[in-house]
Image (cartoon, coloured by chain):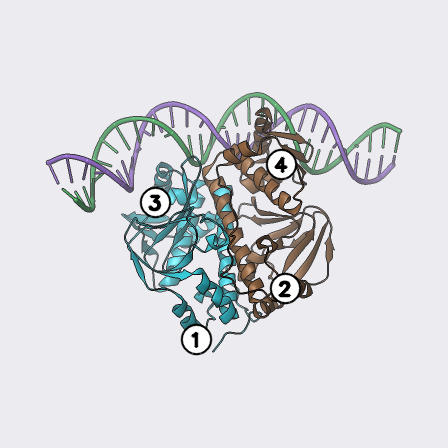
Chain colours: A cyan, B brown, C purple, D green
Amino acid sequence: MTEFRSPSPAELEIFASLAGPVQSVARNRTIRREGDRPQSVYMLVDGWVLSSMTLADGSRQIVKVHLPGDMLGSPSVALDRAAETLTALTPVKLRPISLSALGSLFMRTPHMAALLFLSAQQERVILMDRLCSIGRTSAECRLAAFLVHLHDRLKRIRPDMGPRFEHPLTQEQIGDTIGLTAVHVNRVFRGLEEKKLILRDGHSIELLDIAALRRLSGVSARTLAQDLSWLPKPLH
Amino acid sequence: MTEFRSPSPAELEIFASLAGPVQSVARNRTIRREGDRPQSVYMLVDGWVLSSMTLADGSRQIVKVHLPGDMLGSPSVALDRAAETLTALTPVKLRPISLSALGSLFMRTPHMAALLFLSAQQERVILMDRLCSIGRTSAECRLAAFLVHLHDRLKRIRPDMGPRFEHPLTQEQIGDTIGLTAVHVNRVFRGLEEKKLILRDGHSIELLDIAALRRLSGVSARTLAQDLSWLPKPLH
DNA sequence: CGGCTCGTTGACTCTCCTCAAGTGAGGTGG
DNA sequence: CCACCTCACTTGAGGAGAGTCAACGAGCCG
Protein backbone atom coordinates (compact mmCIF):
# COMPACT_ATOMS: atom_id res chain seq x y z
CA MET A 1 0.00 0.00 0.00
CA THR A 2 2.88 2.30 0.69
CA GLU A 3 3.61 2.00 -3.02
CA PHE A 4 0.82 4.48 -3.58
CA ARG A 5 2.61 6.81 -1.18
CA SER A 6 -0.51 8.15 0.45
CA PRO A 7 -1.10 6.52 3.82
CA SER A 8 -0.67 9.14 6.55
CA PRO A 9 1.46 8.44 9.64
CA ALA A 10 -1.72 8.16 11.71
CA GLU A 11 -3.02 5.50 9.38
CA LEU A 12 0.19 3.55 9.34
CA GLU A 13 -0.02 3.56 13.12
CA ILE A 14 -3.56 2.21 13.04
CA PHE A 15 -2.41 -0.47 10.65
CA ALA A 16 0.53 -1.41 12.85
CA SER A 17 -1.70 -1.61 15.90
CA LEU A 18 -4.04 -4.05 14.14
CA ALA A 19 -1.30 -6.53 13.30
CA GLY A 20 -0.29 -9.22 15.76
CA PRO A 21 3.19 -9.74 17.24
CA VAL A 22 6.15 -10.62 15.05
CA GLN A 23 6.55 -14.37 14.54
CA SER A 24 9.66 -16.14 13.32
CA VAL A 25 9.47 -19.04 10.90
CA ALA A 26 12.45 -21.24 10.07
CA ARG A 27 13.59 -21.91 6.51
CA ASN A 28 11.50 -24.47 4.60
CA ARG A 29 8.69 -24.36 7.16
CA THR A 30 5.11 -24.11 5.98
CA ILE A 31 3.29 -21.02 7.21
CA ARG A 32 -0.08 -22.14 5.96
CA ARG A 33 -1.14 -25.04 3.79
CA GLU A 34 -3.69 -24.98 0.96
CA GLY A 35 -6.98 -26.36 2.25
CA ASP A 36 -6.55 -24.78 5.69
CA ARG A 37 -9.26 -22.40 6.79
CA PRO A 38 -8.03 -18.87 6.19
CA GLN A 39 -8.11 -17.15 9.58
CA SER A 40 -5.70 -14.37 8.96
CA VAL A 41 -3.43 -12.73 6.47
CA TYR A 42 0.22 -11.90 7.17
CA MET A 43 2.53 -8.97 6.70
CA LEU A 44 5.93 -10.19 5.63
CA VAL A 45 8.46 -8.28 7.72
CA ASP A 46 11.61 -10.05 6.62
CA GLY A 47 12.68 -12.94 4.40
CA TRP A 48 11.34 -14.62 1.27
CA VAL A 49 8.13 -16.66 1.09
CA LEU A 50 6.75 -18.83 -1.70
CA SER A 51 3.04 -18.99 -2.41
CA SER A 52 2.29 -22.17 -4.32
CA MET A 53 -0.55 -24.40 -5.45
CA THR A 54 -0.49 -28.15 -6.03
CA LEU A 55 -2.32 -29.74 -8.94
CA ALA A 56 -4.14 -33.03 -9.07
CA ASP A 57 -1.17 -34.77 -10.72
CA GLY A 58 1.18 -33.57 -8.00
CA SER A 59 2.89 -30.86 -10.02
CA ARG A 60 3.36 -27.50 -8.42
CA GLN A 61 2.87 -23.95 -9.59
CA ILE A 62 4.41 -21.09 -7.67
CA VAL A 63 1.91 -18.25 -7.87
CA LYS A 64 4.01 -15.60 -6.16
CA VAL A 65 7.47 -15.07 -4.78
CA HIS A 66 6.89 -12.83 -1.78
CA LEU A 67 9.37 -10.21 -0.61
CA PRO A 68 9.48 -8.15 2.60
CA GLY A 69 6.57 -5.71 2.78
CA ASP A 70 4.19 -8.04 0.96
CA MET A 71 0.85 -9.09 2.33
CA LEU A 72 0.63 -12.88 2.34
CA GLY A 73 -2.42 -15.05 1.96
CA SER A 74 -4.87 -12.33 1.01
CA PRO A 75 -6.42 -14.05 -2.04
CA SER A 76 -7.78 -16.78 0.20
CA VAL A 77 -9.84 -14.42 2.39
CA ALA A 78 -12.54 -14.76 -0.26
CA LEU A 79 -12.54 -18.55 0.11
CA ASP A 80 -13.72 -21.20 2.47
CA ARG A 81 -10.39 -23.05 2.19
CA ALA A 82 -7.05 -21.46 1.44
CA ALA A 83 -5.96 -21.80 -2.19
CA GLU A 84 -2.23 -21.38 -1.66
CA THR A 85 0.45 -22.90 0.49
CA LEU A 86 2.85 -20.40 2.07
CA THR A 87 6.39 -21.68 2.57
CA ALA A 88 9.35 -19.86 4.09
CA LEU A 89 12.21 -19.83 1.60
CA THR A 90 14.56 -18.22 4.10
CA PRO A 91 14.28 -17.55 7.82
CA VAL A 92 11.20 -15.34 7.95
CA LYS A 93 9.64 -12.75 10.21
CA LEU A 94 5.95 -11.98 9.80
CA ARG A 95 3.01 -10.42 11.62
CA PRO A 96 -0.44 -12.00 11.41
CA ILE A 97 -3.47 -9.79 10.78
CA SER A 98 -6.72 -11.38 11.87
CA LEU A 99 -9.73 -11.15 9.60
CA SER A 100 -11.55 -9.05 12.17
CA ALA A 101 -8.63 -6.61 12.25
CA LEU A 102 -8.81 -6.44 8.47
CA GLY A 103 -12.54 -5.80 8.68
CA SER A 104 -12.16 -3.02 11.21
CA LEU A 105 -9.78 -1.29 8.81
CA PHE A 106 -12.67 -0.78 6.41
CA MET A 107 -14.65 0.94 9.18
CA ARG A 108 -11.86 3.01 10.68
CA THR A 109 -9.96 4.27 7.67
CA PRO A 110 -11.75 4.15 4.33
CA HIS A 111 -8.63 5.57 2.74
CA MET A 112 -6.50 2.61 3.82
CA ALA A 113 -9.27 0.27 2.76
CA ALA A 114 -9.20 1.81 -0.69
CA LEU A 115 -5.43 1.39 -0.83
CA LEU A 116 -5.85 -2.25 0.12
CA PHE A 117 -8.29 -2.55 -2.75
CA LEU A 118 -5.85 -0.89 -5.12
CA SER A 119 -3.01 -3.19 -4.19
CA ALA A 120 -5.26 -6.19 -4.75
CA GLN A 121 -5.98 -4.81 -8.22
CA GLN A 122 -2.29 -4.29 -8.79
CA GLU A 123 -1.68 -7.93 -7.92
CA ARG A 124 -4.30 -8.85 -10.49
CA VAL A 125 -2.37 -6.92 -13.12
CA ILE A 126 0.80 -8.75 -12.15
CA LEU A 127 -0.97 -12.07 -12.51
CA MET A 128 -2.39 -11.00 -15.86
CA ASP A 129 1.08 -10.10 -17.07
CA ARG A 130 2.36 -13.47 -15.95
CA LEU A 131 -0.52 -15.16 -17.72
CA CYS A 132 0.61 -13.45 -20.92
CA SER A 133 4.19 -14.44 -20.32
CA ILE A 134 3.45 -18.09 -19.63
CA GLY A 135 0.65 -18.41 -22.15
CA ARG A 136 2.22 -16.71 -25.13
CA THR A 137 6.00 -16.50 -24.90
CA SER A 138 9.03 -18.78 -25.15
CA ALA A 139 11.06 -20.08 -22.24
CA GLU A 140 13.71 -17.43 -22.81
CA CYS A 141 11.18 -14.59 -22.71
CA ARG A 142 9.60 -15.99 -19.57
CA LEU A 143 12.87 -16.21 -17.72
CA ALA A 144 13.80 -12.70 -18.81
CA ALA A 145 10.42 -11.40 -17.63
CA PHE A 146 10.82 -13.18 -14.31
CA LEU A 147 14.29 -11.78 -13.68
CA VAL A 148 13.35 -8.24 -14.64
CA HIS A 149 10.20 -8.32 -12.53
CA LEU A 150 12.08 -9.68 -9.53
CA HIS A 151 14.76 -7.06 -9.97
CA ASP A 152 12.17 -4.29 -10.16
CA ARG A 153 10.55 -5.43 -6.95
CA LEU A 154 13.84 -5.76 -5.08
CA LYS A 155 14.79 -2.32 -6.31
CA ARG A 156 11.60 -0.90 -4.85
CA ILE A 157 12.69 -2.21 -1.46
CA ARG A 158 16.29 -1.00 -1.83
CA PRO A 159 16.31 1.84 -4.34
CA ASP A 160 20.11 2.02 -4.16
CA MET A 161 20.44 -1.55 -5.47
CA GLY A 162 22.43 -2.04 -8.65
CA PRO A 163 21.93 -4.56 -11.44
CA ARG A 164 23.15 -7.40 -9.22
CA PHE A 165 21.07 -9.20 -6.61
CA GLU A 166 21.03 -12.26 -4.38
CA HIS A 167 18.14 -14.69 -4.27
CA PRO A 168 17.42 -17.97 -2.47
CA LEU A 169 15.60 -19.74 -5.33
CA THR A 170 16.59 -23.08 -6.82
CA GLN A 171 16.22 -23.58 -10.55
CA GLU A 172 13.37 -25.96 -9.86
CA GLN A 173 11.52 -23.23 -7.97
CA ILE A 174 12.11 -20.78 -10.80
CA GLY A 175 10.76 -23.40 -13.18
CA ASP A 176 7.67 -23.89 -11.05
CA THR A 177 7.16 -20.13 -11.15
CA ILE A 178 7.39 -19.66 -14.92
CA GLY A 179 5.99 -23.00 -16.02
CA LEU A 180 9.17 -24.82 -17.06
CA THR A 181 11.16 -27.81 -15.85
CA ALA A 182 14.31 -27.35 -13.84
CA VAL A 183 16.38 -28.86 -16.64
CA HIS A 184 15.09 -26.40 -19.18
CA VAL A 185 15.52 -23.45 -16.82
CA ASN A 186 19.15 -24.42 -16.62
CA ARG A 187 19.57 -24.46 -20.39
CA VAL A 188 17.84 -21.12 -20.80
CA PHE A 189 20.02 -19.60 -18.08
CA ARG A 190 23.03 -20.67 -20.06
CA GLY A 191 21.54 -19.17 -23.18
CA LEU A 192 21.08 -15.80 -21.50
CA GLU A 193 24.65 -15.96 -20.23
CA GLU A 194 25.99 -16.75 -23.68
CA LYS A 195 24.09 -13.77 -25.04
CA LYS A 196 25.81 -11.63 -22.39
CA LEU A 197 22.45 -10.60 -20.96
CA ILE A 198 23.12 -11.89 -17.46
CA LEU A 199 25.91 -13.14 -15.23
CA ARG A 200 25.46 -15.79 -12.57
CA ASP A 201 27.52 -16.72 -9.56
CA GLY A 202 25.79 -19.15 -7.28
CA HIS A 203 22.61 -17.52 -6.07
CA SER A 204 23.65 -14.10 -7.24
CA ILE A 205 22.49 -12.75 -10.56
CA GLU A 206 23.61 -9.67 -12.45
CA LEU A 207 21.43 -8.22 -15.18
CA LEU A 208 23.94 -6.97 -17.74
CA ASP A 209 21.42 -5.34 -20.06
CA ILE A 210 18.15 -4.64 -18.33
CA ALA A 211 16.69 -2.77 -21.29
CA ALA A 212 17.34 -5.70 -23.62
CA LEU A 213 15.94 -8.16 -21.09
CA ARG A 214 12.82 -6.06 -20.69
CA ARG A 215 12.39 -5.91 -24.46
CA LEU A 216 12.91 -9.64 -24.68
CA SER A 217 10.33 -10.30 -21.98
CA GLY A 218 7.57 -8.98 -24.23
CA VAL A 219 5.39 -7.58 -21.44
CA SER A 220 5.08 -3.84 -21.03
CA ALA A 221 6.30 -1.95 -18.00
CA ARG A 222 3.55 -0.71 -15.70
CA THR A 223 3.27 2.66 -14.00
CA LEU A 224 1.14 2.91 -10.89
CA ALA A 225 -1.71 5.41 -10.85
CA GLN A 226 -0.48 8.88 -9.95
CA ASP A 227 -3.79 10.65 -9.50
CA LEU A 228 -5.53 9.20 -6.47
CA SER A 229 -7.71 12.23 -5.80
CA TRP A 230 -10.82 10.05 -6.16
CA LEU A 231 -9.95 8.06 -3.04
CA PRO A 232 -11.46 8.90 0.34
CA LYS A 233 -9.26 11.42 2.15
CA PRO A 234 -6.62 10.07 4.54
CA LEU A 235 -6.98 10.57 8.31
CA HIS A 236 -4.52 12.88 10.03
CA MET B 1 -20.33 -8.92 -4.98
CA THR B 2 -23.77 -10.41 -4.83
CA GLU B 3 -21.98 -13.75 -4.88
CA PHE B 4 -21.27 -13.23 -1.22
CA ARG B 5 -25.00 -12.75 -0.69
CA SER B 6 -24.68 -10.02 1.86
CA PRO B 7 -25.30 -6.59 0.33
CA SER B 8 -28.53 -5.17 1.76
CA PRO B 9 -31.22 -3.67 -0.52
CA ALA B 10 -30.25 -0.21 0.71
CA GLU B 11 -26.68 -0.83 -0.33
CA LEU B 12 -27.58 -2.18 -3.72
CA GLU B 13 -29.57 0.99 -4.23
CA ILE B 14 -26.60 3.13 -3.32
CA PHE B 15 -24.51 1.15 -5.74
CA ALA B 16 -27.07 1.51 -8.52
CA SER B 17 -27.29 5.25 -7.93
CA LEU B 18 -23.53 5.60 -8.30
CA ALA B 19 -23.41 3.98 -11.73
CA GLY B 20 -23.95 6.00 -14.88
CA PRO B 21 -26.67 5.43 -17.50
CA VAL B 22 -26.81 2.24 -19.54
CA GLN B 23 -24.73 2.39 -22.71
CA SER B 24 -25.01 0.08 -25.71
CA VAL B 25 -21.96 -1.17 -27.57
CA ALA B 26 -22.14 -2.99 -30.89
CA ARG B 27 -20.50 -6.35 -31.49
CA ASN B 28 -16.72 -6.23 -32.08
CA ARG B 29 -16.47 -2.65 -30.82
CA THR B 30 -13.72 -1.70 -28.41
CA ILE B 31 -14.96 -0.36 -25.08
CA ARG B 32 -11.54 0.69 -23.89
CA ARG B 33 -8.08 0.14 -25.28
CA GLU B 34 -4.93 -0.80 -23.35
CA GLY B 35 -2.86 2.33 -22.84
CA ASP B 36 -5.93 4.54 -22.35
CA ARG B 37 -6.17 6.43 -19.08
CA PRO B 38 -8.51 4.51 -16.81
CA GLN B 39 -11.30 6.95 -15.91
CA SER B 40 -13.97 4.53 -14.91
CA VAL B 41 -14.87 0.90 -14.44
CA TYR B 42 -17.99 -0.68 -15.95
CA MET B 43 -20.78 -2.94 -14.78
CA LEU B 44 -21.63 -5.39 -17.52
CA VAL B 45 -25.43 -5.48 -17.74
CA ASP B 46 -25.79 -7.71 -20.76
CA GLY B 47 -23.64 -9.47 -23.34
CA TRP B 48 -20.14 -10.95 -23.46
CA VAL B 49 -16.91 -8.91 -23.26
CA LEU B 50 -13.30 -9.96 -23.78
CA SER B 51 -10.52 -8.48 -21.72
CA SER B 52 -7.23 -8.94 -23.56
CA MET B 53 -3.61 -7.83 -23.60
CA THR B 54 -1.27 -7.54 -26.57
CA LEU B 55 2.37 -8.58 -26.36
CA ALA B 56 5.37 -6.99 -27.99
CA ASP B 57 5.39 -9.57 -30.80
CA GLY B 58 1.75 -8.90 -31.59
CA SER B 59 0.33 -12.03 -30.02
CA ARG B 60 -2.70 -11.71 -27.83
CA GLN B 61 -3.65 -13.15 -24.46
CA ILE B 62 -7.27 -13.05 -23.35
CA VAL B 63 -7.16 -12.35 -19.66
CA LYS B 64 -10.85 -12.75 -18.91
CA VAL B 65 -14.08 -13.63 -20.65
CA HIS B 66 -16.63 -11.37 -18.99
CA LEU B 67 -20.27 -12.32 -18.45
CA PRO B 68 -23.24 -10.21 -17.37
CA GLY B 69 -22.88 -9.03 -13.77
CA ASP B 70 -19.09 -8.70 -14.03
CA MET B 71 -17.22 -5.56 -13.22
CA LEU B 72 -15.01 -4.61 -16.18
CA GLY B 73 -11.71 -2.81 -16.17
CA SER B 74 -11.13 -2.81 -12.43
CA PRO B 75 -7.52 -4.09 -12.46
CA SER B 76 -6.44 -0.95 -14.27
CA VAL B 77 -7.66 1.44 -11.56
CA ALA B 78 -4.30 0.84 -9.89
CA LEU B 79 -2.45 1.94 -13.03
CA ASP B 80 -1.59 5.06 -14.89
CA ARG B 81 -2.50 3.42 -18.19
CA ALA B 82 -5.04 0.65 -18.68
CA ALA B 83 -3.49 -2.80 -18.97
CA GLU B 84 -6.34 -4.49 -20.81
CA THR B 85 -8.39 -3.88 -23.92
CA LEU B 86 -12.13 -4.44 -23.49
CA THR B 87 -13.93 -5.68 -26.61
CA ALA B 88 -17.61 -6.45 -27.04
CA LEU B 89 -18.02 -10.03 -28.22
CA THR B 90 -21.76 -9.61 -28.65
CA PRO B 91 -24.03 -6.57 -28.56
CA VAL B 92 -23.40 -5.27 -25.05
CA LYS B 93 -25.11 -3.13 -22.43
CA LEU B 94 -23.00 -1.64 -19.68
CA ARG B 95 -23.02 1.11 -17.06
CA PRO B 96 -19.90 3.15 -16.35
CA ILE B 97 -18.86 3.80 -12.75
CA SER B 98 -16.58 6.77 -12.38
CA LEU B 99 -13.56 6.54 -10.14
CA SER B 100 -15.02 9.16 -7.82
CA ALA B 101 -18.22 7.11 -7.49
CA LEU B 102 -16.07 4.12 -6.62
CA GLY B 103 -14.21 6.18 -4.06
CA SER B 104 -17.38 7.42 -2.42
CA LEU B 105 -18.47 3.83 -1.96
CA PHE B 106 -15.58 3.36 0.45
CA MET B 107 -16.84 6.31 2.50
CA ARG B 108 -20.54 5.56 2.40
CA THR B 109 -20.70 1.81 2.84
CA PRO B 110 -17.66 0.10 4.30
CA HIS B 111 -19.48 -3.18 3.94
CA MET B 112 -19.81 -2.83 0.18
CA ALA B 113 -16.21 -1.69 0.01
CA ALA B 114 -15.16 -4.86 1.78
CA LEU B 115 -17.22 -6.94 -0.67
CA LEU B 116 -15.51 -5.15 -3.53
CA PHE B 117 -12.21 -6.08 -1.94
CA LEU B 118 -13.30 -9.70 -1.56
CA SER B 119 -14.35 -10.00 -5.17
CA ALA B 120 -10.99 -8.59 -6.27
CA GLN B 121 -9.35 -11.29 -4.17
CA GLN B 122 -11.59 -13.87 -5.73
CA GLU B 123 -10.48 -12.74 -9.17
CA ARG B 124 -6.92 -13.20 -8.03
CA VAL B 125 -7.69 -16.79 -7.11
CA ILE B 126 -9.23 -17.34 -10.53
CA LEU B 127 -6.10 -15.96 -12.19
CA MET B 128 -3.92 -18.11 -9.97
CA ASP B 129 -5.89 -21.20 -10.99
CA ARG B 130 -5.49 -20.26 -14.63
CA LEU B 131 -1.77 -19.76 -14.10
CA CYS B 132 -1.61 -23.34 -12.81
CA SER B 133 -3.65 -24.58 -15.72
CA ILE B 134 -1.58 -22.85 -18.38
CA GLY B 135 1.76 -23.30 -16.66
CA ARG B 136 1.54 -26.93 -15.67
CA THR B 137 -1.08 -28.84 -17.65
CA SER B 138 -1.58 -30.22 -21.17
CA ALA B 139 -3.77 -28.69 -23.84
CA GLU B 140 -6.54 -31.16 -23.09
CA CYS B 141 -6.58 -30.30 -19.38
CA ARG B 142 -6.59 -26.61 -20.16
CA LEU B 143 -9.55 -26.84 -22.46
CA ALA B 144 -11.44 -28.97 -19.95
CA ALA B 145 -10.71 -26.45 -17.20
CA PHE B 146 -11.84 -23.62 -19.42
CA LEU B 147 -15.12 -25.28 -20.34
CA VAL B 148 -15.94 -26.29 -16.77
CA HIS B 149 -15.12 -22.85 -15.43
CA LEU B 150 -17.22 -21.15 -18.07
CA HIS B 151 -20.08 -23.53 -17.38
CA ASP B 152 -19.87 -22.86 -13.64
CA ARG B 153 -20.04 -19.13 -14.19
CA LEU B 154 -22.96 -19.34 -16.60
CA LYS B 155 -24.74 -21.58 -14.12
CA ARG B 156 -24.36 -18.96 -11.44
CA ILE B 157 -26.21 -16.53 -13.68
CA ARG B 158 -28.91 -19.05 -14.65
CA PRO B 159 -29.06 -21.71 -11.95
CA ASP B 160 -31.62 -23.69 -13.97
CA MET B 161 -29.15 -24.14 -16.84
CA GLY B 162 -28.35 -27.72 -17.82
CA PRO B 163 -25.07 -29.15 -19.16
CA ARG B 164 -25.54 -27.42 -22.50
CA PHE B 165 -24.75 -23.78 -23.23
CA GLU B 166 -24.28 -21.30 -26.05
CA HIS B 167 -21.22 -19.11 -26.40
CA PRO B 168 -19.99 -16.58 -28.96
CA LEU B 169 -16.29 -17.52 -28.90
CA THR B 170 -14.24 -18.55 -31.91
CA GLN B 171 -11.64 -21.29 -31.51
CA GLU B 172 -8.96 -18.67 -31.96
CA GLN B 173 -10.35 -16.71 -29.02
CA ILE B 174 -10.46 -19.84 -26.89
CA GLY B 175 -6.86 -20.49 -27.86
CA ASP B 176 -5.86 -16.97 -26.88
CA THR B 177 -7.53 -17.58 -23.53
CA ILE B 178 -5.82 -20.86 -22.64
CA GLY B 179 -2.49 -20.28 -24.39
CA LEU B 180 -2.90 -22.44 -27.50
CA THR B 181 -3.17 -21.91 -31.24
CA ALA B 182 -6.55 -22.10 -32.94
CA VAL B 183 -5.42 -25.18 -34.87
CA HIS B 184 -4.53 -27.05 -31.73
CA VAL B 185 -7.74 -26.01 -29.96
CA ASN B 186 -9.60 -27.61 -32.83
CA ARG B 187 -7.72 -30.88 -32.48
CA VAL B 188 -8.22 -30.99 -28.72
CA PHE B 189 -11.94 -30.31 -29.18
CA ARG B 190 -12.10 -33.33 -31.43
CA GLY B 191 -10.24 -35.37 -28.83
CA LEU B 192 -12.75 -34.47 -26.13
CA GLU B 193 -15.59 -35.34 -28.46
CA GLU B 194 -14.07 -38.71 -29.30
CA LYS B 195 -13.77 -39.42 -25.59
CA LYS B 196 -17.47 -38.63 -25.25
CA LEU B 197 -16.75 -35.87 -22.77
CA ILE B 198 -18.42 -33.12 -24.77
CA LEU B 199 -20.73 -32.57 -27.73
CA ARG B 200 -20.50 -29.60 -30.06
CA ASP B 201 -22.95 -28.09 -32.46
CA GLY B 202 -21.85 -24.77 -33.84
CA HIS B 203 -21.44 -22.41 -30.93
CA SER B 204 -23.31 -24.64 -28.56
CA ILE B 205 -21.45 -27.02 -26.24
CA GLU B 206 -22.77 -29.80 -24.06
CA LEU B 207 -20.67 -31.14 -21.21
CA LEU B 208 -21.46 -34.85 -21.19
CA ASP B 209 -19.48 -35.70 -18.06
CA ILE B 210 -18.80 -32.67 -15.94
CA ALA B 211 -17.24 -34.67 -13.12
CA ALA B 212 -14.75 -36.28 -15.48
CA LEU B 213 -13.96 -32.93 -17.10
CA ARG B 214 -13.39 -31.37 -13.71
CA ARG B 215 -11.08 -34.22 -12.71
CA LEU B 216 -9.25 -33.89 -16.02
CA SER B 217 -8.80 -30.16 -15.54
CA GLY B 218 -6.52 -30.77 -12.55
CA VAL B 219 -7.50 -27.62 -10.65
CA SER B 220 -9.57 -27.90 -7.51
CA ALA B 221 -13.08 -26.51 -7.16
CA ARG B 222 -13.31 -23.42 -4.98
CA THR B 223 -15.94 -22.61 -2.38
CA LEU B 224 -16.50 -18.98 -1.47
CA ALA B 225 -16.11 -17.94 2.15
CA GLN B 226 -19.26 -18.61 4.12
CA ASP B 227 -18.40 -16.82 7.34
CA LEU B 228 -18.23 -13.11 6.64
CA SER B 229 -18.91 -12.02 10.22
CA TRP B 230 -15.59 -10.19 10.25
CA LEU B 231 -16.79 -7.69 7.66
CA PRO B 232 -18.20 -4.30 8.63
CA LYS B 233 -21.96 -4.56 9.15
CA PRO B 234 -24.20 -3.75 6.19
CA LEU B 235 -26.36 -0.63 6.17
CA HIS B 236 -30.12 -1.01 6.38
C1' DC C 1 33.50 -39.20 5.68
C1' DG C 2 28.92 -40.05 3.67
C1' DG C 3 24.55 -38.64 2.15
C1' DC C 4 21.91 -35.29 0.64
C1' DT C 5 20.32 -31.56 -2.64
C1' DC C 6 21.26 -28.80 -6.50
C1' DG C 7 23.23 -27.80 -10.83
C1' DT C 8 24.80 -29.44 -15.32
C1' DT C 9 24.86 -31.91 -19.60
C1' DG C 10 23.52 -35.42 -23.19
C1' DA C 11 20.26 -38.22 -25.80
C1' DC C 12 15.84 -39.03 -27.00
C1' DT C 13 10.77 -38.16 -27.13
C1' DC C 14 6.57 -35.84 -27.62
C1' DT C 15 3.47 -32.11 -27.40
C1' DC C 16 2.28 -28.32 -29.67
C1' DC C 17 3.33 -24.93 -33.45
C1' DT C 18 3.72 -23.66 -38.30
C1' DC C 19 2.49 -23.79 -42.83
C1' DA C 20 -0.70 -25.13 -46.14
C1' DA C 21 -4.83 -26.32 -48.34
C1' DG C 22 -9.62 -27.34 -48.51
C1' DT C 23 -14.54 -26.93 -46.77
C1' DG C 24 -18.68 -24.71 -45.43
C1' DA C 25 -21.72 -21.04 -43.65
C1' DG C 26 -23.10 -16.40 -43.81
C1' DG C 27 -23.19 -11.91 -45.83
C1' DT C 28 -23.12 -8.72 -49.81
C1' DG C 29 -23.80 -6.79 -54.18
C1' DG C 30 -24.98 -7.10 -58.89
C1' DC D 1 -31.42 -15.29 -57.07
C1' DC D 2 -26.87 -16.34 -57.68
C1' DA D 3 -21.88 -15.35 -57.75
C1' DC D 4 -18.51 -14.01 -54.83
C1' DC D 5 -16.03 -13.05 -50.66
C1' DT D 6 -14.75 -13.57 -46.12
C1' DC D 7 -14.24 -15.77 -41.96
C1' DA D 8 -14.18 -19.70 -39.13
C1' DC D 9 -13.43 -24.49 -38.94
C1' DT D 10 -11.01 -28.65 -40.34
C1' DT D 11 -7.31 -31.72 -41.57
C1' DG D 12 -2.54 -33.05 -42.99
C1' DA D 13 2.54 -32.89 -42.94
C1' DG D 14 6.64 -31.47 -41.03
C1' DG D 15 9.41 -29.06 -37.52
C1' DA D 16 10.81 -26.98 -33.17
C1' DG D 17 10.76 -26.18 -28.45
C1' DA D 18 10.33 -28.07 -24.15
C1' DG D 19 9.87 -32.43 -21.45
C1' DT D 20 11.80 -36.88 -19.83
C1' DC D 21 15.24 -39.88 -18.40
C1' DA D 22 19.71 -40.57 -16.96
C1' DA D 23 24.21 -39.75 -15.29
C1' DC D 24 27.72 -37.10 -13.00
C1' DG D 25 29.91 -33.48 -10.26
C1' DA D 26 30.02 -30.01 -6.60
C1' DG D 27 28.81 -28.10 -2.42
C1' DC D 28 26.82 -28.46 2.11
C1' DC D 29 25.48 -30.42 6.42
C1' DG D 30 25.40 -33.77 9.90
Numbered tag placed on residue B11 in the rendering: 2
| Mark 3: secondary structure | helix
Seen from the viewer's position, the closer of residues A36 and B49 is A36
Nearer to us of marks 2 and 4 is: 2
Q: Nearer the viewer, residue A34 or C15?
A: A34
Q: At label 1, which amino acid type do we have?
A: Ala
Which residue is under mark 1? A10
Q: Quadrant of residue D1?
A: top right
- Respond whether the residues carrying marks 2 and 4 are from the same subunit: yes
Tell me the chain of label 4. Answer: B
Dot 1: chain letter: A
Residue A193 disc label? 3
At x 36%, y 44%, the residue is: A173
Give the label on residue A131, or none. Answer: none
In the image, which is nearer the foreground, mark 3 or mark 2? Answer: 2
Badge 3 and badge 1 both on one subunit: yes
Contact check, label 3 and label 1, Cβ < 8 Å: no
Amino acid residing under circle 3: Glu
Give the distance between the C-alpha atoms of the residues marked 1 and 4, in whole angstroms: 53 Å
- Sort mark 1 into few (<14), some (14-19) or many (20+) by Cα contacts within 10 Å: few
